[in-house]
């Protein structure tokens, strides 16, 4: 059973193209146009013969109509999907900026703006408005008084003292910074295109094209909703992972063609890292495909949603797989903790140091596009795609259920996909703000020695579950509950701090205490 | 209450060293009490002749465990007698630091209790003044192989003051640019800064504010 | 891949200052290094030969701008040795408070810069936020946020402001709680431990022979500190001990140097709090500038033949000033001022420590030695 909702863009586009082409067909003249020519007999040939075509425009058009319709349909869907991707992607840098700002406690534009009327600890910035000429200060002072009453701080609260500024500023926090992405993009578009003197010009220009093209092509196969996709071949998963994996080639070209030792090192590191993490990624995705029984992404999602198919989100059946997917995807999109190829501290910008202007801007956007693709794919593979949480369970409730079902049916599936993807991106940002950068050889060791065997284990596990516990209908609910509980238990056990005494006498693996502790002040133990 | 090295212990250790190095030929040494601010310190001040510097350095290192070369200063005294035109001042310390021992693969840090330090591990301060005779290229024996900390100090002294070090490997300019002309050593007294004298010291480079009485005056 | 020389710097986000580190790499492994200093050589030693003793203090602030108070105090002690001045006790306490708060601020700057070297961006903002607290305190004392010109020959410029003790206590107590957050972000992160342990080994005896001192040395498991070995100021009156780290068998690695500095921040905070309690005259009394309680009369001339020297425990190691008297103005200017910068000597040693590790370890190792190029190039 394929899931569906009212936002059937594929269907609408399809009917729109077929309706318009049918109209064109009907408008075509239906008479045969006889363009035949009879060549009379000459001394060369005794009998006259006719040559030439007989056009029937309508039939001819009917011949090319399917191809034309599918071409138009593809064009329209590509535009819709691309536009939807770019528009919804605006949320991504916004989440990144705001969430990182909150995590890092940065006092940015918001506080600066607000300090114009609030000041610190109740003392405003010197009643600056009274110094303005021509008495303009009066009305400004009144406005500021009003602002202070509604959105200021009372003197007792100390929420805006210089150091304790951990307070949530309220909704003022959200607005500034929204247009930063646009401003950045326009700035990049106006910068000069500089090519290093001895760079390999052809490869230098081709590399960003490869990176960008493959990244955007990934979105051709990603369904945003049950009926919003640009292409849906039977093996869409394979196609998509194949295209996703071409970008490392572009990265390596970029690093090598710039004729710069730094970028060369960055390109090498990147090639090594991305190759190393492709393999566990592909094996994990293979596990998802095995569990869901298909290589088609829409069918994978339908399997998770469908009442008579799986009816369990894959994350509860393979939490290990979800974790592996998360980690390998973070490595694939080169975010901290895996951003060694573009590590600022050593390589300035790594493999894209020599690119400026729109080429850099687009590659930077491509990095965010890849993160976005990773988030959407996680939502599709593991979080049930366009299903609301507990959708059918809620719909089965006695009389609240029908209200809930009606309400949920109003929200198009694409909304759920986007919400899940954005929430997952917030997790990406959280990881970025908290963790350090892993060194390249440690990244590679981690990928080959830990992730690869784990992903193989995950695949074996998926095969075992599918063969042993699946009988063609929905998963037995005990199974995901058991798997989730066991995985959660293992995670908790691994995350608990190790035995402190063992650490004291061990040969310094990870933790040391200063021998002489100072006081006062609480120490962490 | 706070624990610091006891002053008498340091003075004793200083006197032991002074007695020992005074026996070297050409070396005069004494213990000088200095006070900076509130605490008095006893410093060993030694004055070897240029030829006996190397022997003194080796003796300090091997017999008295002076293990830390703090600073090497070169001074140009154009107004002194011919045999004291250049001076090199070495500041050395004995830190008493040893590598901490390890038991069962775990290192046991060495926590020295300052009030109970005695004898050979007592931190002492040594100040060595070597006067060099006048020359266009004064030079003295290098101690780069005894204390590696002297390495860049000697490079800096040659770079800025012009005193060469015999036996120093890899002498080069460290603070001035690499391609500075040979023979240019800015801390020699014949080089003057632009505002070195009174007349140009303040914002009056052409002397409009000067009065006849101010000629030759230093403030 | 063949061996090649990479030049890190002079424009490079890693270098914590303006210098070049040329690295010879074989693939990802560092085979040889060559540091190149002198980009901001401003000729401070030469300039000081034509300045009064009071005027030199402002230059010494600007030697290491991240740790200005420690440098001006290092100079002042040497000038007091030269001019043979006895400093009132209250002034010594005030100086101690200023120096220790400055040490905290310097270490916070280092910690905040060390995070981005290793990849963590959040810690930078958090540490600078706390450093703002310290800079506010120092601004109350000295008048400006970075270059304070605080000590005078014979005492200090002015007394603790009204309410300083109360604000300082509140801020230092808040700071002591906040240190736990930094430790959470560093010590409890496996990635940081994996990046910084086992990297950049250095053994104490080798370090001492190379001229390295201070927190870098104490990371090796020995508690040598100039404040007790060649005592100055009133450290003898307070209860403290320099933090020492239990290093590994092969020596001190980056993790040890990091932990020593975090503990040093705690020790400095505790020293400042104790000094506020014990200061003669009480922390809440305020003497006018040039009151003999905080400033003793000092001669302004040093005849030829005199000299003064002082070893000082700077945030980065042992700094030292040697001043020879008898300069211009019949001794009003020094004849020669010679400045010992700990980082000038540590950088070649750190460059040697890097050999054998990966390119990615270069910022980790270099950052852990806490370079500040202002004092290096003078």
Image (spheres, coloured by chain):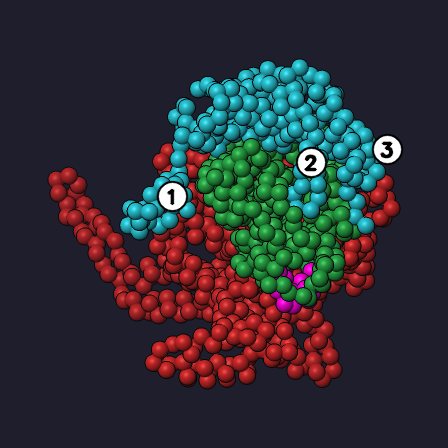
Residue at 40% x, 30% y: name it: B190
Q: Which residue is mark 2?
A: B33
Check residue A270 for magenta coloring. no
User: Which secondary structure, mark 2?
Assistant: strand
Say yes or no: labels 1 and 2 on the same chain: yes
Q: Colour of chain A?
A: red
Q: Which chain's residue wears label 2?
A: B
The magenta-colored residue range is C159-172
Q: Is residue C309 visible?
A: yes
Q: Which chain's residue wears label 1?
A: B
Image quadrant of residue B179? top left
Q: Tell me the green chain.
A: C
Q: Which residue is mark 1?
A: B217
The reply, left or right, for residue B61 in relation to residue B216 is right
Image quadrant of residue C365? top right
- How packed is label 1: few (under 14 Cα within 10 Å), some, or many (20 or more)? few
Residue B52, which numbered label? none
Q: Tell me the cyan chain.
A: B
Q: Nearer the viewer, mark 2 or mark 3?
A: 2
Residue at 38% x, 59% y: name it: A186
Callout 3 touching callout 1 (CB < 8 Å): no
Q: Which residue is mark 3?
A: B104
The reply, left or right, for residue A195 in relation to residue A454 is left
Q: Which circle's residue, 3 or 1, is located before the other in the chain?
A: 3
User: Which secondary structure, mark 1?
Assistant: loop
Q: Which circle's residue, 2 or 3, is located before the other in the chain?
A: 2
Residue nearer the viewer, A485 or B69:
B69
């Amino acid at each position: 059973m394929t899931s569906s909702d009212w936002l059937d863009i594929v269907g609408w586009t399809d009917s729109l193209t077929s309706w318009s082409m049918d109209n064109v067909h009907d408008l075509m003249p239906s008479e045969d146009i006889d363009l035949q020519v009879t060549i009379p007999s000459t001394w060369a040939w005794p009998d006259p013969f006719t040559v030439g075509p007989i056009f029937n425009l309508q039939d001819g058009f009917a011949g090319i109509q399917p191809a034309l319709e599918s071409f138009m349909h593809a064009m329209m869907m590509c535009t819709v999907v691309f536009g939807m991707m770019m528009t919804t992607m605006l949320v991504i840098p916004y989440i990144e900026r705001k969430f990182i700002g909150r995590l890092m406690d940065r006092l940015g534009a918001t506080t600066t703006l607000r300090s114009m009327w609030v000041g610190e600890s109740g003392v405003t910035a010197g009643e600056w408005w009274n110094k303005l000429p021509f008495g303009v200060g009066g009305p400004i002072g009144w406005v500021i008084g009003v602002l202070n009453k509604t959105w200021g701080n009372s003197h007792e609260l100390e929420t805006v003292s210089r150091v304790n500024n951990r307070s949530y500023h309220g909704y003022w926090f959200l607005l500034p910074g929204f247009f930063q992405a646009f401003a950045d993009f326009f700035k990049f578009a106006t910068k000069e295109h500089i090519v290093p003197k001895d760079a390999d010009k052809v490869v230098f220009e081709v590399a960003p094209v490869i990176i960008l093209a493959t990244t955007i092509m990934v979105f051709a196969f990603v369904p945003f909703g049950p009926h919003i996709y640009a292409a849906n071949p039977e093996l869409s998963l394979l196609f998509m992972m194949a295209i996703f994996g071409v970008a490392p080639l572009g990265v390596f070209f970029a690093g090598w063609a710039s004729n710069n030792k730094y970028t060369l090192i960055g390109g090498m590191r990147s090639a090594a890292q991305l190759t190393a993490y492709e393999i566990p990624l592909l094996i994990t995705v293979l596990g998802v495909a095995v569990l869901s029984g298909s290589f088609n992404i829409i069918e994978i999602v339908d399997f998770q949603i469908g009442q008579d198919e799986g009816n369990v989100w894959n994350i509860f059946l393979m939490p290990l797989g979800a974790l592996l997917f998360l980690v390998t995807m973070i490595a694939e999109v080169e975010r901290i903790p895996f951003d060694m190829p573009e590590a600022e501290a050593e390589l300035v910008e790594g493999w894209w140091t020599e690119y400026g202007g729109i080429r850099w801007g687009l590659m930077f956007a491509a990095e965010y596009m890849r993160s976005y693709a990773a988030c959407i794919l996680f939502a599709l593979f593991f979080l049930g795609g366009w299903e609301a949480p507990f959708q059918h369970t809620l719909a089965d409730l006695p009389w609240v259920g029908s209200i809930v079902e009606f309400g949920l049916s109003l929200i198009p599936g694409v909304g759920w996909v986007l919400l899940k993807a954005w929430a997952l991106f917030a997790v990406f940002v959280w990881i970025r703000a908290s963790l350090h950068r892993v060194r390249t050889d440690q990244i590679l060791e981690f990928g080959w020695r830990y992730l690869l065997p784990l992903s193989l284990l995950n695949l074996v596990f998926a095969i075992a579950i599918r063969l042993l516990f699946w009988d063609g209908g929905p998963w037995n609910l005990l199974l995901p509950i058991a798997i989730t509980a066991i995985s959660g238990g293992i995670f908790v056990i691994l995350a608990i701090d190790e035995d402190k005494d063992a650490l004291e006498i061990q040969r310094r693996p990870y933790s040391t205490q200063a021998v002489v502790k100072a006081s006062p002040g609480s120490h962490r133990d | 209450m706070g624990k610091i090295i006891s002053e008498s212990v340091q003075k004793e250790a200083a006197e032991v060293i002074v007695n020992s190095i005074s026996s070297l030929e050409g070396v005069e040494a004494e213990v000088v009490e200095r006070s900076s601010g509130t605490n008095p310190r006893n410093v060993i001040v030694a004055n070897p002749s240029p030829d006996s510097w190397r022997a003194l350095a080796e003796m300090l290192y091997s017999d008295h465990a002076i293990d830390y070369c703090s600073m090497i200063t070169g001074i140009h005294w154009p107004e002194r007698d011919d045999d004291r035109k250049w001076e090199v001042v070495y500041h050395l310390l004995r830190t008493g630091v040893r590598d901490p021992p390890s038991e069962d693969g775990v290192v046991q840090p060495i926590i020295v209790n300052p009030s109970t330090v005695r004898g050979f591990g007592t931190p002492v301060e040594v100040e060595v003044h070597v006067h060099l005779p006048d020359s266009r290229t004064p030079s003295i024996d290098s101690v780069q192989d005894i204390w590696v900390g002297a390495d860049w100090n000697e490079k800096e002294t040659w770079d800025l003051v012009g005193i060469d070090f015999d036996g120093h490997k890899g002498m080069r300019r460290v603070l001035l640019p690499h391609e500075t002309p040979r023979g240019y050593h800015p801390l020699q007294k014949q080089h003057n800064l632009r505002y070195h004298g009174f007349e140009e010291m303040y914002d009056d480079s052409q002397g409009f504010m000067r009065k006849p009485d101010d000629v030759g005056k230093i403030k | 891949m063949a061996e090649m020389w990479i030049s890190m710097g002079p424009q490079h986000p890693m270098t914590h200052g303006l210098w070049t580190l040329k690295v010879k790499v074989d693939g990802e492994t560092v085979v040889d290094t060559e540091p190149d200093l002198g980009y901001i050589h401003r000729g401070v030693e030469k300039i000081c030969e034509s300045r009064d003793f009071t005027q030199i203090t402002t230059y010494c602030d600007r030697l290491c701008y991240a740790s200005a108070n420690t440098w001006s105090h290092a100079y002042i002690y040497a000038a007091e040795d030269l001019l043979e001045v006895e400093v009132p006790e209250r002034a010594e306490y005030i100086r101690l408070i200023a120096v220790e708060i400055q040490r905290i601020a310097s270490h916070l700057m280092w910690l905040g810069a060390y995070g981005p070297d290793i990849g963590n961006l959040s810690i930078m903002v958090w540490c600078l936020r706390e450093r703002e607290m310290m800079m506010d305190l120092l601004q109350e004392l000295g008048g400006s946020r970075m270059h304070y010109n605080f000590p005078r020959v014979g005492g200090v410029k002015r007394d603790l402001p009204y309410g300083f003790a109360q604000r300082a206590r509140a801020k230092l107590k808040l700071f002591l709680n906040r240190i736990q957050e930094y430790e959470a972000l560093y010590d409890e992160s496996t990635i940081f431990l994996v990046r910084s342990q086992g990297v950049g080994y250095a053994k104490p005896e080798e370090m001492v022979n190379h001229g390295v001192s201070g927190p870098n040395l104490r990371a090796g498991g020995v508690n040598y500190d100039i404040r007790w070995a060649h005592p100055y100021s009133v450290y003898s009156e307070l209860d403290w001990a320099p933090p020492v780290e239990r290093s590994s068998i092969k020596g001190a690695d980056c993790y040890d140097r990091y932990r020593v500095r975090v503990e040093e921040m705690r020790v400095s905070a505790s020293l400042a709090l104790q000094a506020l309690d014990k200061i003669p005259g009480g922390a809440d009394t305020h003497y006018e500038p040039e009151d003999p309680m905080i400033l003793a009369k000092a001669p302004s001339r040093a005849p030829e033949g005199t000299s003064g020297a002082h070893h000082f425990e700077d945030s980065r190691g042992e700094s030292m000033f040697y001043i020879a008297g008898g300069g211009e103005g019949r001794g009003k200017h020094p004849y020669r001022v010679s400045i010992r910068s700990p980082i000038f000597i540590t950088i070649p040693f750190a460059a040697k420590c890097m050999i054998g590790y990966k390119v990615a370890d270069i910022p980790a190792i270099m950052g852990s030695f806490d370079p500040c190029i202002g004092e290096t190039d003078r």
